[in-house]
Amino acid sequence: MNESPSINRTPLVISMAVAILGFVLLVLYVRQFQREVRGGELVELLATRKAVSAEEPLDEQALFVRTLPEAYVEERHVLASDLPRVLGVRAANDLKANQTLLWTDLAAAEPGSSSLSSRIPQGMRAITVEQGTRRALAELLLPGDRVDILLTKPKPGHESTAVTVPLLQNLLVLAVGNSVHASYDSATTGRSSSVTLLVTMEQASLLAQAKRGGEISLILRNANDLEINEGLADTDDSDVLKLEERERRQRKALIERLD
């Protein structure tokens, strides 16, 4: 009786192992890609479940946990792990429902105190910029708004040519003039060209240097817009004069009807 030749299973086992390894690597790559697209790992932050009035103490019923990609998380956001530190702390101003909680939303001073330093989170700084003759926007700003900053100054090596640089983004307005309250009813709010911003030490140094021989413009943004636009190009006269460049930038604009 003839015996059938033995089957060499080694190539089959190797093929299956390679296929499994390839599948695992593919899954890992897809997960990594998804994390990068959404801005990194999700971070748990505190947000308001309901509207909270100024000077009202925060409790667990007023707060819930919201997740945000780590690329959009800043030092002024209150982490979910910091819940014990904020329970019982009064709100510094009126808070809307479903609003991400910031350290600047918490009153660190005694009721009725208008101390600006009490509103600055540890590790952060406050710096004042002057709008000069461009007061129109400054008159509309309120503490609690967020702004971007453009710097316009002579182009290095080409003193006759000006260039506008996107300098900083998503800075919190701490005060307008000498008012730290988010209200139009103060005589000082909206009557000053000076705006005080919450910044890091590095951002403060950058702003201080930018003010030397340059003109600073503030751009108001939605208070809930936390996105930082990467890779923004400088703008010079050629961008303004070239029709194709103007059309390119116009195509990127999303125009929505204001209610």
Image (cartoon, rainbow, N blue to C red):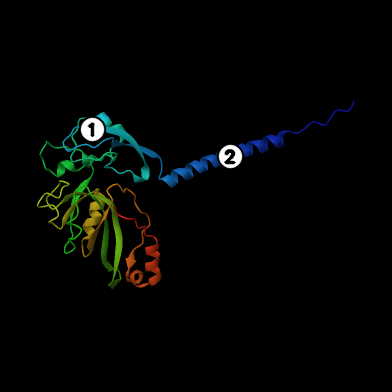
Q: Residue at x 53, y 40 (%)?
A: 27
Q: How many marks?
A: 2
User: Dividing the picture into quarters, in which one does residue 208 lie?
Assistant: bottom left
Residue type at mark 1 is Val
Q: Residue furthest top?
A: 1
Q: Which residue is mark 2?
A: 23
Callout 2: SS:
helix
Q: Amino acid at mark 2?
A: Phe
Position of 37 with respect to 234 (left or right) is right
Above or below, comparing residue 181 to residue 110 in the picture: below
Task: Give the labeled residue for mark 1.
Answer: 86
Q: Which residue reaches farthest front?
A: 259
257, 238: nearer the viewer: 257
Name which quarter of the figure residue 26 lies in.
Answer: top right
Instruction: Give percent across and percent down for residue 251.
Output: 40, 62
Q: Position of residue 242 (x, y in %)?
A: 37, 72
Q: Residues within 10 Å of mark 1 (few under 14, many from 20)?
A: some
**Percent x, y of residue 129:** 18, 56
Alpha carbon separation for disc pair 1 and 2 = 46 Å
Location of residue 89 (image quadrant) = top left
The mark lying in front, picked from 1 and 2, is: 1
SS state under label 1:
helix
Compared with 237, 167 (above or below) is above
What number is the disc on residue 18?
none
Residue depicted at x 40% and y 70%: 244
Q: Earlier in the sequence, mark 1 or mark 2?
A: 2
- Going 34% across and 63% down the picture, which residue do you hit? 234
Which quarter shows the N terminus? top right
- Closer to the camera in the image, 105 or 25: 105
Residue lying farthest bottom? Answer: 160
The reply to whether the C-beta atoms of the residues labelled 1 and 2 are less than 8 Å apart is: no
